[in-house]
Image (cartoon, rainbow, N blue to C red):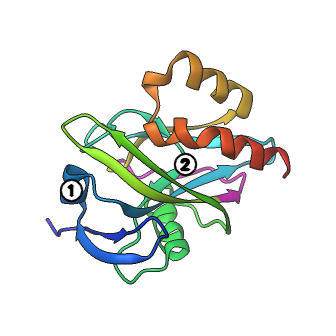
Amino acid sequence: MEEEYVILVNEKDEEVGKMEKLQAHQEGKLHRAFSIFIVNSKKEILIQQRAATKYHSAGLWSNTCCGHPRPSEITKEAALRRLNEEMGMIVELKYLFQFTYLSKLENNLTEHELDHVFIGFSDETPVGNPKEISDWKYVKIEILENELKTNSEKYTTWLKIVFGQLKKEIQFI
């Protein structure tokens, strides 16, 4: 299996090196990432259930797509690439904001990411890659907000962290 590398950054999102992805999560190194949210014409958010084979957060529900740009890859281009690889979708993306978070995960792993958040609009039916996702659905914002409160253990850490800011952004769209 080919090693995947992430871009290590400082708090200003300035590149400071690269590291193998699993090692970065084992050592809790700050690295660049992205999260994508696809919204349909009913203002429902497309969420996915991560495949059971993922090395962390397996089986949890999350945003439409997320990932890491490869070294020397522009973040938006990486987001477009991963959206197609994971969900079989080609959608124009708009940059919304970025945030940094640090969270302990299972298997002695740590997510420490400077996460660039993108939004896209589509009524397209995704064609999920079974190596990446096990299920998907469009869900109303209010229902997702309630689910994050009442069944938070079913959702990824980063989705729970970013949802409040995302909701503010979507209400103005």
Q: Is residue 49 above or below residue 19?
A: above
Which region shows up in magenta?
119-130
Q: Where is residue 107 drawn, in percent x and y?
A: 19, 36
Task: Please say whether residue 105 is one of the residues in the magenta stretch.
Answer: no
Looking at the image, which residue is at 71% across and 49% down? 39
Magenta span: chief secondary structure: loop
Q: Residue furthest right?
A: 172
Q: Residue furthest front?
A: 11
Q: Residue furthest top?
A: 150
Q: Earlier in the sequence, mark 2 or mark 1?
A: 1
Q: Amino acid at mark 1?
A: Leu
Quarter occupied by the N terminus = bottom left
In this view, the mark in front (2 or 1) = 1
Q: Which residue is mark 1?
A: 22
Q: Amino acid at mark 2?
A: Thr
Q: Secondary structure at mark 1?
A: helix
Looking at the image, which residue is at 32% across and 37% down? 58
Q: Is residue 23 above or below residue 166?
A: below
Q: CA distance from mark 2 to mark 1?
A: 22 Å
Looking at the image, which residue is at 73% across and 27% down? 142
Q: Where is residue 145 drawn, in percent x and y?
A: 66, 28
Q: Which numbered tag is attached to residue 64?
A: 2
Q: Where is residue 165 drawn, in percent x and y?
A: 67, 44
Q: Is residue 70 left or right of residue 75?
A: left
